[in-house]
């Protein structure tokens, strides 16, 4: 690096104070947070973060799906250099997933304000609605709407796992804003996130320069069999929705193991009814999450699952209905942004690994409309979506400094949108 700003460093203690304070909203045992999208806890988190944004004098705008973008003006008007992530969590959330990327953006902007450094472009930090998709599928809902991948009206009508509706919940918590969706395309977008996996720690790397995000396929299966007496119903006369659900869970696990490579498969939700010890389950609802960096292999996994489900339905005499909750092809990030993240991290003295992301991120949506990349920092023991999620404060600060200097470099670069087609991952 060789610019008058090279010496700039963020304030790691200030970052930690904000992370800790945000984590106290929706607290759960073990030090994590539960702020499912558009709940009262999400509203409280939003109120706190927007207060911090306004305290910094930023222009805070809320759009029709509740995305919040806070901007500091640049020397020139026009598209912003943008960063950000999400502050909603899964029910068993840690304190870093998403929150880090948002509070890192605030920290970067506060560092620039304190140092009196002006940027050429406006600089913005965003938090997007319902990144997790745990309450309202699909995941990355807010950023998907921001980039025009889903119409606002359609998004507002989505029903959650508790029967609530996105638009109603946005109104209830006061976060259906006046600004239009899709939103303006930034000059560039870079998201800092914890890795949520074991790769950086195992390799002794402090920084990941993320090359892309793997494809995601979520399906909900509703199985209808026949509730019956557990003691009197002969095995060959059952229409057991519980057994069919269990068979699907075992099958996807075996399939992922057989396919190997980057194929992963998860049954994360399973509800049986009537859910009683002495009743054959009459119905079951379960979800299957399939992911792969290779679109062709992901499609193969989906076809394998569909064939298995058809066979099980016939064999057990149950009805199985499938509903797609999310389907996103693998995404490759902009080559020059990835290179800028890597070289910035190296020039700050960090060991860097170029790697794909296993988790979904708002950056994968932003990649549709502007040059985009991500910075990863290590997750201890690769644990995430769990209150035990942890990243060393030294690594957190390293990540935010890499974000700061990456954004400053991109601010000065004329970037080309080389975003490859969906389905390709570098
Ligand atoms: C979102 O965080 C996901 O990857 O499930
Ligand atoms: Mn996240
Ligand atoms: Mn997450």
Image: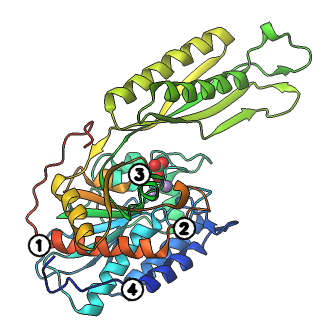
Residue 48 in picture, x, y percent from top left: 50, 79
Query: In the image, which is nearer the foreground, mark 4 or mark 3?
Result: 4
Q: Which residue is mark 2?
A: 95
Label 2 beta carbon less than 8 Å to ligand 2: no
Estimate the spatial distance between the alpha carbons at disc 1 and disc 4, rounded to whole Å. Answer: 23 Å
Q: Which residue is mark 3?
A: 141
Q: Which residue is mark 1?
A: 412
Judged from this view, the residue extending furthest toward the left is: 414
Is there any visible trace of residue 73 in the rendered image?
yes
Question: Tag 1 or tag 2, which sits nearer the N-term?
Answer: 2
- Tell me the element at label 2: loop
Which residue is at a point 31% across and 84% down the rendered structure image?
A: 9
Q: Count neighbours of disc 2 (C-alpha within 10 A) and say few if under 14, some if 14 to 19, many if 20 or more.
A: many
- Tell me the element at label 4: loop
The image quarter containing residue 301 is top left
Q: Which residue is mark 4?
A: 11
Query: In the image, which is nearer the foreground, mark 1 or mark 3?
Result: 1
């Amino acid at each position: 690096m060789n610019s008058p700003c090279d010496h700039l460093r963020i304030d790691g203690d200030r970052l930690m104070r904000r992370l800790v304070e945000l984590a106290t909203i929706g607290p759960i045992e073990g030090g994590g947070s539960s702020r499912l999208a558009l709940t009262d806890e999400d509203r409280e988190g939003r109120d706190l973060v927007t207060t911090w944004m306004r305290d910094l004098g930023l222009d805070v705008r809320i759009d029709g799906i509740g995305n919040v973008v806070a901007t500091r003006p640049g020397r020139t008007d026009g598209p912003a250099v943008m960063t950000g992530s999400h502050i909603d969590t899964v029910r068993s959330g840690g304190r870093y997933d998403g929150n880090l990327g948002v509070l890192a953006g605030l920290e970067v902007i506060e560092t620039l304000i304190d140092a009196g450094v002006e940027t050429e472009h406006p600089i913005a930090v965003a938090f997007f609605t319902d990144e997790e998709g745990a309450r309202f599928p699909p995941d990355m809902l807010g950023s998907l709407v921001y980039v025009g991948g889903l119409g606002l009206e359609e998004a507002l009508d989505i029903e959650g796992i508790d029967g609530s509706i996105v638009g109603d919940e946005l109104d209830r918590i006061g976060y259906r804003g006046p600004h239009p969706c899709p939103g303006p395309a930034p000059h560039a977008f870079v998201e800092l996130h914890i890795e949520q996996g074991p790769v950086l720690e195992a390799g002794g790397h402090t920084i990941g320069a993320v090359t892309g995000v793997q494809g995601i396929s979520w399906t909900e299966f509703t199985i209808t069999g026949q509730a019956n007496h557990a003691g009197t119903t002969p095995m060959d006369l059952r229409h057991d929705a519980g057994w069919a659900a269990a068979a699907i869970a075992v099958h996807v696990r075996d399939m992922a193991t057989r396919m190997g490579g980057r194929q992963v498969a998860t049954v994360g939700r399973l509800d049986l009814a009537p859910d009683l010890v002495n009743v054959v389950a009459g119905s079951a609802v379960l979800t299957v999450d399939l992911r792969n960096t290779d679109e062709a292999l992901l499609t193969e996994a989906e076809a394998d699952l569909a064939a298995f489900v058809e066979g099980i339905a016939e064999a057990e005499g149950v009805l199985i209905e499938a509903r797609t909750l999310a389907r996103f092809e693998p995404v490759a990030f902009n080559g020059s942004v990835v290179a800028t993240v890597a070289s910035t991290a190296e020039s700050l003295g960090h060991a860097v690994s170029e790697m794909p992301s296993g988790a979904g991120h708002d950056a994968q949506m932003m990649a549709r409309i502007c040059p985009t990349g991500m910075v990863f920092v290590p997750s201890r023991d690769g644990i995430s979506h769990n209150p035990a999620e942890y990243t060393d404060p030294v690594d957190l600060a390293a990540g935010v400094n890499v974000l700061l200097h990456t954004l400053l470099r991109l601010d000065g670069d004329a970037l080309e949108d080389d975003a490859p087609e969906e389905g390709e991952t570098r």
